[in-house]
Amino acid sequence: MEKFYYGKTEAGLSKAEIKAALLESLEGKALKKVLIIPPDFTRFHSNAGYITNVYYHALTDLGCTVDILPALGTHVPVTEEEAGLMFGDIPYDRFIPHNWRTDVMKIGEVPAEYLEEITEGLWHDPVSVEINKLVMDESYDLIISPGQVVPHEVIGMANHSKNLFVGVGGSDMINKSHMVGAVYGMERMMGKDHTPVRKVFDYGLEHFLKDRPILFVLTVCTAPAGESLVHGLFIGDTRKVLEKAIELSQEKNIDFVETGIKKCVVYLDPGEFKSTWLGNKSVYRTRMAIADGGELLVLAPGVERFGEDGKVDELIRKYGYRGRLKTLEAFEQPENQDLRDNMGAAAHLIHGSSDDRFTITYAVKNITKEEVEGVGFRAADYDEVIKKYDPAKLQYGYNTLEDGEEIYYIPNPALGLWINKEKF
């Protein structure tokens, strides 16, 4: 099945329209037990929280048992407070934390020959297809996978099968898919479909999950004034829902600037961004727009660590954001087995550096300047910096400050991709 819903105005779809579409998707289904796999709190603006809430109540009203398995990937579990903010009044005991190291089973393998073909010979190893055991539990009559399609640094465009194979996937798939993307080059992929990483996930879905009753519920959103607007809702069990969502996201979520940005200021909502692992979306999503020799200033009042996971945090502190070549050099050294065992972290280190093309300054409150500088960024005091660059006073896009300085301001880097038209 495939159903596509588009907002008729810039305000997008109303909650009533979204609810009606979700209820329609359940018509004619005799269901006793359902698993919902929404994104976690780091995708707060996806509207997947509201979608999950609607499904939960509609299904439980029909006497159905509903379990919720947030697609954590390597992130920390959703807290009870976060669950309330994002998912509303769903009882917290319905949420099942996913452990990417222990809760998975291997269901197949993407062969090395296929990886070589799709990466133009840049990758030579097979990839294990691992998934949370609950996805393969045949007691579930339906598996609902909601989430937002938006430009993404690892895969090109987020969601659909990524929500499964990374969100509730295992270490081999998470690590190798991230490294494949880093080796192939994020700037060749961001904002595009049919990238090598997307092809890996497509292969896994087509070969190993084709018999599972998975319903994708995809949104395309913007948040021009901080409040998320849903411009499209795409519901179905085929790849077509992803393709239609990508078409709309490319229209709504990619912003072209006429020339390279000399100074870009990005704000990270403290409720959403507590680590550079997440906060570096400010780097990924703007790097194609910032001019050579330019500056990226990241306003990061909530950042208090580097990795979402203790081991990854340790690796970031050890190796730092030193650039693609230095990271690959470290990755190849036999003594750095810890980095080789955590390819996702190695890929993240590559993604999070500007390769000395522009400077990156993190303005922080909850982590020391010495720690920030220790991983290769510049550091500044948040409270001092916002005296000049106050997110409450800045408007999205170009701003001319009192001293005549021109900056480009982005209030949430997770919701878009910025590209210099001159170089695209």
Image: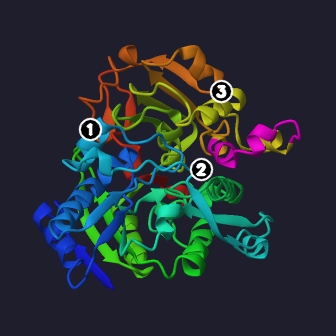
Query: What residue is disc 3 on?
Result: 317
User: Residue 319 at what x, y percent from top left?
Assistant: 72, 31
Q: Residue at x 26, y 38 (%)?
A: 395
User: What segment is highlighted magenta in the picture?
Assistant: 333-348
Given this view, does label 1 or label 2 mark the residue nearer the observer? Answer: 2
Q: Earlier in the sequence, mark 1 or mark 3?
A: 3
For label 2, the crowd category at 10 Å Cα-Cα, with few meaning under 14, some 14 to 19 and many 20 or more, is: few
In this rendering, is residue 2 above or below 281? below
Q: Which residue is mark 2?
A: 102
Residue furthest to the left in view is 16
Name the amino acid type tagged 3.
Arg
| Amino acid residing under circle 2 | Thr
Q: Secondary structure at mark 1?
A: loop
The CA distance from mark 2 to mark 3 is 25 Å
Identify the coloring: rainbow
Q: Quadrant of the N terminus?
A: bottom left
Q: Judge whether residue 206 can be spotted in this image.
A: yes
Where does residue 75 sit, x and y in percent of width and height?
49, 43
Q: The residue tagged with tag 3: helix, strand or loop?
A: helix
